[in-house]
Image (cartoon, rainbow, N blue to C red):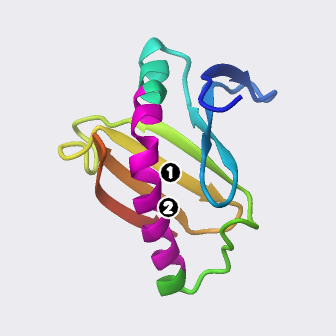
Amino acid sequence: MLNRIKKTDFGDGDIAFTVLLPVPPFGDADFAAPDTSRSSRDLLSDLITRWEQLWPDILERMQKGIEDYGTDQRLGSDEFMVSVSPMEKDVYMGDRSDVHLRIEFDEVPLWDYFLKGSEIVHHQAVF
């Protein structure tokens, strides 16, 4: 069910809160906050309220990055997973962002987005 946060057991000992969000025009994708604390549930709840505004910008930046780097990733064909975590102040971009969102395909690069509210303050490919 879209936009419904649930606790998910991945069967390998990992448990997370997850939510299914729309990633048009490709359908829906699972987003996981990698722990089961109340703050992770709140993090996903907050992301849900901002997602419609964030996704078009994330998509545009990722498409441009895929083109610029000449990767073999094919949006809409290749499967990907998304992890969402709160930022800590003493890590890279921790002083400028609240949330780290990572889109991970089977092949590199990964795509990192650092968010402050509904704004992307930085994004990068990770090889």
Question: Which mark is drawn over residue 102?
Answer: 1
Q: Distance from label 2 to label 1 (Cα)?
A: 6 Å
The residue shown at (67%, 80%) is 72
The residue shown at (62%, 29%) is 18
Circle 2: is it few (<14), some (14-19), or many (20+) Cα within 10 Å?
A: many
Find the magenta span and give its range. 46-66
Q: Position of residue 46 (x, y in %)?
A: 40, 29
| Residue found at the far left of this picture | 95
In this rendered view, identify the residue nearer to me: 44 or 54: 54
User: Left or right of 38: which side holds 109?
Assistant: right
The residue shown at (69%, 27%) is 14
Tell whether position 55 is magenta: yes
Quadrant for the N terminus, please.
Answer: top right
Q: Position of residue 33 (x, y in %)?
A: 54, 31
Helix, strand or loop at label 1? It is strand
Helix, strand or loop at label 2? It is strand
Judging by the rendered image, the residue that carries numbered circle 2 is: 111
Q: Position of residue 75 (x, y in %)?
A: 66, 68
Q: Amino acid at mark 2?
A: Trp
The quadrant holding residue 106 is: bottom right
C-beta proximity under 8 Å, tags 2 and 1: yes
Does residue 121 lie above or below 127 as drawn? Answer: above
User: Left or right of 75: which side holds 42?
Assistant: left
Q: Amino acid at mark 1?
A: Arg
